[in-house]
Image (spheres, grey):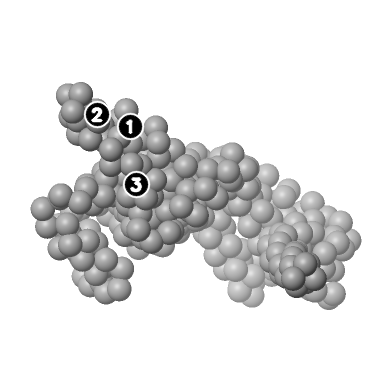
Amino acid sequence: MIYKNKIFQILTGLLMLALVLSCILPLIMLLASSFSSEEQLLTKGYSFLPQGISLDAYAYLWKIKGSLLRAYMMSGIITGAGTIVNVTITLLFAYALSQKDLPGNRAISFFLFFPMLFNGGFVSTYLVYTQIFHIRDSLPAMIVPYLLMSGFHVIIMRTYLTNTIPGEVKESARMDGAGEYAVLMHIIIPMSRPIIATIALLASITYWNNWTNGVYFLNTRTDLFGIQNYLNMVLSNISFLQAQQANVLQGMEAQIPNTSIRMAIAIIAIIPILAAYPFFQKSFVKGITIGSVKG
């Protein structure tokens, strides 16, 4: 029995090591490629060590640092505002669904679950947001469509509230005269910090990485571009320069490290998420583990 347990532990350890390497090695290759020279990348391909160390990619991004910082600021505003609204709606929705005596609980749960499987499609969604809500070329266009709430997040939080917070605690508070608002603010939220941190992290990652809303709903307001949309625009401009055949543009093209700059852009885009994750890790693991257990 002890021998079998050791074998299981070794196999589990090897599996976890493989998973960790599958996450870390691409980042190492990404970082090494961003510091490699364009010629070496084109001739020798990617590697885990920089080839012909060059800072050309970061030097090019430094030239556009003003626009880059503005895009970072917009991403911060969009991510911060979107995450707060997302977590608030998710918490309120999940708290209501966690009440067993809620009238129409099953119907509301079905209403929540059904859009996870079927939706009206992009065209109808686009028309609703642009023709009815008129959010095109505005800041809400980067926050509302597709991102404001996730049914999956609501289900996770509802499961957490149902399985973790005893009903007796809420009943005791109500017997002492506390209303629903007091119960939510003074009991539910303090006891739900792990799942709230988990949903906040998931929502912030989604907002930070989103670029489709900028493509779909921002036609003229490029000043509202987040970091993802701006960097995508930089790549498009570089590709445009490289597609030209004029001699002047060919000279400009030679100065632009196309391949390495893609890697540098990816590094710049993921830095905030990598910096934030360690602060949420403990709560994230606890929240996602408890919240995913079926109640």
- Between the residue at mark 1 and the residue at mark 3, the CA separation in whole angstroms equals 11 Å
Q: Are marks 1 and 3 in contact (CB under 8 Å)?
A: no
Residue to which mark 1 is pinned: 187
List x then y, in percent, for residue 111: 19, 64
Q: Measuring 15% from the left and 63% from the top, which residue is drawn there?
A: 107
Residue drawn at (68%, 44%) of the image: 62
Horizontal and vertical percent position of residue 34: 75, 58
Q: Nearer the viewer, residue 263 or 83?
A: 83
Q: From mark 2 to mark 1, how far is it between C-alphas?
A: 8 Å
Q: Tell me the CA gap for discs 3 and 2.
A: 16 Å
Q: Are marks 3 and 2 in contact (CB under 8 Å)?
A: no
Residue, far right: 52
Q: Secondary structure at mark 1?
A: helix
| Mark 1 Cα shell of 10 Å, populated few (<14), some (14-19), many (≥20) | some
Instruction: Specify the amino acid type for callout 3.
Output: Leu
Q: Is residue 90 left or right of residue 258?
A: left
Query: What type is the residue that disc 2 sits on?
Result: Ala
Q: CB of mark 2 within 8 Å of CB of mark 1?
A: yes
Query: In the image shown, does 119 or 194 lie closer to the viewer?
Result: 194
Residue 109 lies left or right of residue 149; in this view the side is left
Residue type at mark 1 is Ile
Q: Residue at x 74, y 71 (%)?
A: 1
Identify the residue position indicated by label 3 in the image: 161
